[in-house]
Amino acid sequence: MQHINYYTITLLMAIESSFVPLPSEVVIPPAIWKAASGELNMYLVVLFATFGAILGAMFNYIMARWLGRVIVYSLVESKAGKLFLLNRHKVEHAEAYFLSHGKSSTFIGRLIPGIRHLISIPAGLAKMNVGQFVLYTALGSGIWHIILAAVSYSVYSQQELLKKYMSELSYSLLFVGVIFVIYLIYKYKKKKQ
């Protein structure tokens, strides 16, 4: 929390919008909590988060446009792609979504978890107009960050309630995390068989 500032928000959101699976839900809420306590400005948090999202999305867009479809898919299927939790199905799904919804998919895709960070790849493969890509990415990311900021600020205003039930909430989140890890291990082992 003490290292969150506008630069780290921009950097982390750029990473989140690239192919690295870092959820924005890990970045925006702590930044908004700092803003609610007076250390940061809430509007600037949303602005810098959106700027970072554009930077990360541009990285994916440029790489996809420059490398082309064959190389992008071979990278996704490599060990490095698997390390970043990428697979052919996810990229094909993002590409099909882009093709069926056209340019607006860049805007809509920024609001959908799982597609959010990958929608830039089919936009680059399709050689979408850069200005339109940046505009739709900024609008979609901005709306998503405003939603996260509003929810985070609402939760911050309920601090007394959070403090009262913090241990129950912590155990519940830990339980959900353990179940998710067990699910991932099960899915990985089943896939290997």
Image (tube, grey):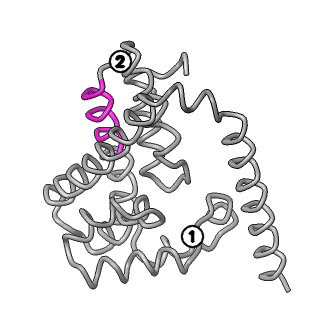
Which residue is found at the position 49% from the left and 72% from the top? 71
The residue mark sitting in front, 1 or 2, is: 2
85 vs 149: above or below: below
Give the farthest residue toward the top.
39
In the rendering, at what x and y percent does residue 57 appear? 35, 53
Secondary element at image label 2: loop
In the rendering, at what x and y percent does residue 85 appear? 62, 63
Where's the C terminus, which quadrant?
bottom right
Q: Is residue 61 left or right of residue 187?
A: left
151 vs 5: above or below: below
Nearer to me, 65 or 175: 175
Question: Hey, what amino acid is under mark 2?
Answer: Leu
Which residue is found at the position 34% from the left and 57% from the top? 62
Mark 2: give few (<14), some (14-19) or many (20+) Cα within 10 Å.
Answer: some
Residue 52 on the magenta segment: yes
Q: Is residue 78 left or right of residue 127?
A: right
In the rendering, at what x and y percent does residue 162 appear? 57, 32
Q: Earlier in the sequence, mark 1 or mark 2?
A: 2
Which residue is found at the position 30% from the left and 26% from the top? 42
What segment carries the magenta color? 42-53
Q: For the stretch drawn in magenta, what is the main secondary structure?
A: helix
Can you identify the residue that label 2 sits on?
40
Q: Are marks 1 and 2 in contact (CB under 8 Å)?
A: no
168 vs 114: above or below: above
Nearer to me, 12 or 169: 169
Work out how far the residue at label 1 is from the one at label 2, CA to CA, in angstroms. 38 Å
51 vs 5: above or below: below
Where's the N terminus, which quadrant?
top right
Q: Is residue 175 left or right of residue 25?
A: right
Can you identify the residue that label 1 sits on?
76
